[in-house]
């Protein structure tokens, strides 16, 4: 005789469903409250360049693992600074290793939020959204890979917002992971390559900042390097062109359907 099934207390399923989002929000609040997001910047990279390079050269494998964990956590907690982290990866590990580590970390962090959002909100939204939402979900799901690939190639929306939106459309985890990993490759390796080539620039900025601190104190000194200064019009046009290529399959399906 099989053991009787123990009934679940009322509300236990709801509690489990909301536990992960509550933990994520609490960690986000703690991170911002402690100012941890400020370390994910080019300013921090310039200021701590020597310590980072020294640690990486002595503990290469460990440093790479720490980098992946920090990057994945930053993505999962929706901290800004992915570009700065990618540049740091290129500087510390080289464009190939740093780029690959960033792709893996960003995909893992995105998958974590995708799964949490899908299990917490996706089912409830599906039940309450009505026929219009169901139609939208079905339409997106048919070409989910192409649509998500476009959104990853062309950064029109924040990374975290795309993660959440994808979860609410009922997309499969495998499709999400594949489109994310492939879609972020061009931008990730572009910034990792920039990071590898910025060593002399960052070194000069670090020296200028250090001289300023000695002369005027840290409160009066600022780093002149920014993420915005690294993004060129040509780079944005290239990403847009790649994004349009990703939508070709959707266009072909629509054209054939209208024949």
Image (cartoon, helix red, strand yellow):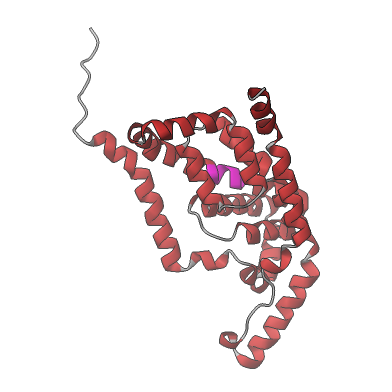
Left or right of 187, for residue 111: left
Identify the residue at the far bottom of this view. Answer: 215
Image height of 7 relative to 210, above or below: above
| The quadrant where residue 56 appears | bottom right
Residue 112: x and y in percent read 49, 42
Decide: is 74 above or below 216: above
Which part of the image, by quadrant, shows the C terminus?
top right
Nearer-the-camera pick, 40 or 47: 40
Vertical side of 68 occupied by 40: above or below: below
Query: To which quarter of the image does residue 91 belong?
Result: bottom right
Q: Is residue 179 magenta?
A: no
Residue drawn at point x = 37 percent, y = 50 percent: 23
Instruction: Give the residue at the far top of this rendering.
Output: 1
Q: Residue 225 in the image: x percent, y percent?
A: 69, 73
In front: 150, or 14?
150
- Camera-side residue of 109 and 135: 135
The secondary structure making up most of the magenta span is helix
What's the magenta region?
104-110
Q: Residue at x 39, y 54 (%)?
A: 25
* Image quadrant where one finds the N terminus: top left
**Among the 4 quarters of the image, the one containing residue 48:** bottom right
Position of residue 68 measured from the top left corner of the image (x, y, whole percent):
61, 50
Q: Locate residue 74, reporting x and y percent.
A: 53, 55
The residue under the point 48% across, 44% down is: 164
Residue at point 64%, 62% (across, down):
84
Q: Is residue 93 visible?
A: no
């Amino acid at each position: 005789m099989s053991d009787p099934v123990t009934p679940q207390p009322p509300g236990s399923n709801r509690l489990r469903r909301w536990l992960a989002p509550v933990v994520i929000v609490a960690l986000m609040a703690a991170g911002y409250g402690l100012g941890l997001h400020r370390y994910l910047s080019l300013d921090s990279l310039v200021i701590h360049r020597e310590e980072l390079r020294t640690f990486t050269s002595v503990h290469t494998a460990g440093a790479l693992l720490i980098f992946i964990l920090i990057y994945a956590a930053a993505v999962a907690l929706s901290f800004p600074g992915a570009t700065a982290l990618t540049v740091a990866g290129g500087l510390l590990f080289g464009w190939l290793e740093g780029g690959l580590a960033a792709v893996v970390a960003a995909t893992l962090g995105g998958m974590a939020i995708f799964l949490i959002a899908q299990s917490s909100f996706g089912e409830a939204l599906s039940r309450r959204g009505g026929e219009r939402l169901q139609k939208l979900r079905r339409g997106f799901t048919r070409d989910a890979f192409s649509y998500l690939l476009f959104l990853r190639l062309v950064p029109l929306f924040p990374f975290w917002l795309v993660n959440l939106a994808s979860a609410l459309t009922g997309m499969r985890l495998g499709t999400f992971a594949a489109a994310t990993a492939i879609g972020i490759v061009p931008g990730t390796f572009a910034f990792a390559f920039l990071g590898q080539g910025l060593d002399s620039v960052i070194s000069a900025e670090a020296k200028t900042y250090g001289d300023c601190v000695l002369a005027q104190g840290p409160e009066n000194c600022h780093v002149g390097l920014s993420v915005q200064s690294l993004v060129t019009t040509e780079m944005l046009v290239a990403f847009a062109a790649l994004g349009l290529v990703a939508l070709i399959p959707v266009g072909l399906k629509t054209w054939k359907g209208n024949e």
